[in-house]
Amino acid sequence: MAKIIAISNQKGGVGKTTTAINLSSALSRLGNKVLLVDFDSQGNASQGLGALKSNGQPTVYNVMLEGFPIQNAIVHGDKCPVDILPSNMTLAGADLMMDRLSSGKEQLLKNALDPIRDQYDFILIDCPPSLGLLNTNALTAADSVLIPVQCEYYALEGVTQLLLTIRLVQKTSNPKLLIEGILMTMFDYRTRLSVDVSQEVRQTFGRLVYQNSIPRNVKLSEAPSRGVSIFEYDPKCKGAQAYARLSREMLHLKEDVFA
């Protein structure tokens, strides 16, 4: 039975999609079968893994709102060992479609994933940068939430708003929802700002914050243009090493299995 992790922060540009792609790949390289759900209408995770191959291709929208069989919508990675349920701009209208439903609107993604949940070890959901019904669906379907936080001012403000949403979802539709962890992204040890923000977040949230941070690394920005994760693009760069360490930390592994 897969563990479902929503990667969420309503702030844009904090590294959600980068984390979704590369953490999925890192977990798969540790021997896990992984499905990445692109739940953002921009479809960046789908593009970043080369999963959008043709016009009219079925996406998460068709599965969730039109009853399309999820098994027929999943794209099996060829370059990267991760399966992906793709997304495109049709998902932008999902909020309006869901809002018209009289009941069960928060359960649509959960219901869509249930038939294939036992086929995977991990299902990661790349959430949109918002706190609307799409994000609520992701949090309702998830077992836990991983929160990427960019090392910048106002970082805590974004986390606080998301935590309020998580508490609301816990009260209304998913009482078992947990916080998987808080991940510091775009960390630059050379700047006082990164160090100060990281210290502030760690003082506020303590053990919820991962020991490993993700550095600023140009290779992480370049890899999606090739339709691959960082492990296919440059497995020895600092970005790849950081996501490898993060995956081991999540699984409580000590040995360097990526060496």
Image: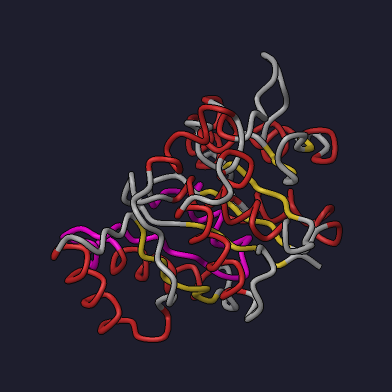
Look at the image and say whether residue 164 sits in the magenta stretch.
no
Vertical position of residue 19 compared to residue 59: above or below: below
Residue at x-position 72% and y-position 21% = 57
How many circles with numbers are drawn on the protein?
0
Residue extent of the magenta highlight: 131-158
Closest to the observer, 81 or 160:
81
Residue at x-position 59% and y-position 42% = 229
Residue at x-position 50% and y-position 42% = 99
- Position of 246 with respect to 57 (left or right) is left
Q: Residue 48 in the image: state x and y as whole percent.
A: 56, 34
Closest to the observer, 241 or 104:
241
Q: Residue 30 in the image: state x and y as whole percent.
A: 73, 63
Q: Residue 112 in the image: state x and y as whole percent.
A: 74, 48
Vertical position of residue 88 compared to residue 121: above or below: above
Residue at x-position 79% and y-position 62% = 31
Task: Please identify the quarter of the rendering in which residue 150 is found.
Answer: bottom left
